[in-house]
Amino acid sequence: MSTDSAPVVVGADGSRSAIGAVRWAAADAARHDSPLQIVYAIGVPIDVGPTLGYAPIDAESYRKAGQEALAEAREIAAAAAAPIAPIEIETVVREAAPVPLLRERSTTARIVVVGTRGLGALRRGLLGSVSTSLARHAHCPVAVIPEFAERADGPVVVGTDCSPSSVHAIAVAFDQAARRGAELVAVTAWSEFYRYLSRAELAAEAESKLSDALSPWCARYPEVAVRHVVAEERPARLLLGTADDAQLLVVGSHGHGGFVGMTLGSVSQAVLHAAECPVIIARSAS
């Protein structure tokens, strides 16, 4: 496998959810022979405490907490990577809000990784402000890791509408499946919107489009076993049902047809909130 000098960037804050994200990020860095950056955003408005009637905030105590969280995260990352390969680890602490800091880091990252919940600056809902903002605005793929995501087996599932905009999701999914030695399950949904075709014709057309979309990637990754799931179903429900035993779910940042707004609309929100496995929003560099 090729190496990648672009780092894996992971947000850390000492919470159990963030620790899970650090483990996942470290293993991913080891699989790609990439460096790992562990980032702690203090995110404390130092000057608002007295204004709001609270005791003055001791900025140094927040910095110390950040350094302690990063020291713990470094040990956890090294242990998670060790069974795969040793990795280079860098820790970063900044007085900044999580979203701007992680978005800035995403300009040079291969992937940004966050947990689903956090403490302190990250407590305000990674499935609200932080992960949603990163899914919309990051300059690289974003992985959102549930608190309990220890599933090491199972397939890699990718949702695709077979349009050109879903190519990056397919590429990410094949790469992940190959490096994990996992089966790839490609999922596409169809509906009876086009009334001039029968249901059988619609299903056959969807299957044909899926085969065409996957063909070049199957040739590039002949070692990856691929299974198709083509069904008349709501996209989010189909994806979540298929990913019930998955170790990873990958979706693109834009879609058409059954997967409109895959990462920016209702489908992505449903997937991010309900998936029990890690989810990668396969944003391309921008």
Image (cartoon, rainbow, N blue to C red):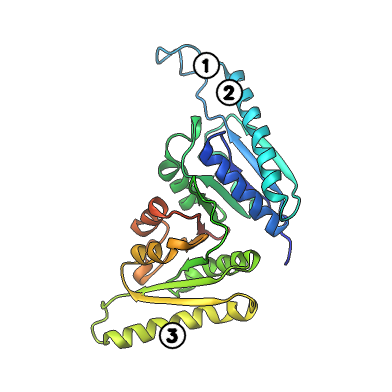
Disc 2 crowd, CA 10 A, few/some/many (<14, 14-19, 20+): some
Sequence-first tag of 2 and 1: 1
- State which quarter of the image contains the C terminus: bottom right
Q: Which residue: 50% across, 50% down?
A: 144
The one nearer the camera, 51 or 119, is 119
Q: Which residue does the numbered mark 3 point to in the structure image? A: 208
Instruction: Tell me the residue at 51%/41% (across/down).
Output: 17
Viewer-side label of 3, 1: 3
Say whether marks 3 and 1 touch (CB < 8 Å).
Answer: no
In the displayed structure image, the side of residue 194 where residue 160 appears, left or right: right
Q: Where is residue 80 in the image (x, y as percent from the top left)?
A: 67, 48
Q: Name the residue under label 2.
A: 62
Give amino acid for label 3: Ser
Q: State the separation of the CA atoms marked 3 and 1.
A: 61 Å
- Disc 1: CA contacts within 10 A as few (<14), some (14-19) or many (>=20): some
Residue beneath disc 1: 57
Task: Give the SS element for disc 2.
Answer: helix
Residue at figure coordinates x 32%, y 88% from the top left:
201
Relative vertical location of residue 100 with respect to residue 94 in this rendering, above or below: below
- Residue 247 appears at what percent x and percent y? 52, 60
Residue 149 position in % (x across, y down): 51, 51
Image marks 2 and 1: residues in contact by CB distance under 8 Å: yes
Q: Which residue is drawn at 45% across and 75% down?
A: 162
The residue closer to the viewer here, 286 or 151, is 151
Mark 2 to mark 1 CA distance (whole Å)? 9 Å
Name the spot of residue 132 as percent of width and height, x first. 43, 48
Give the CA separation, mark 3 to mark 2: 56 Å
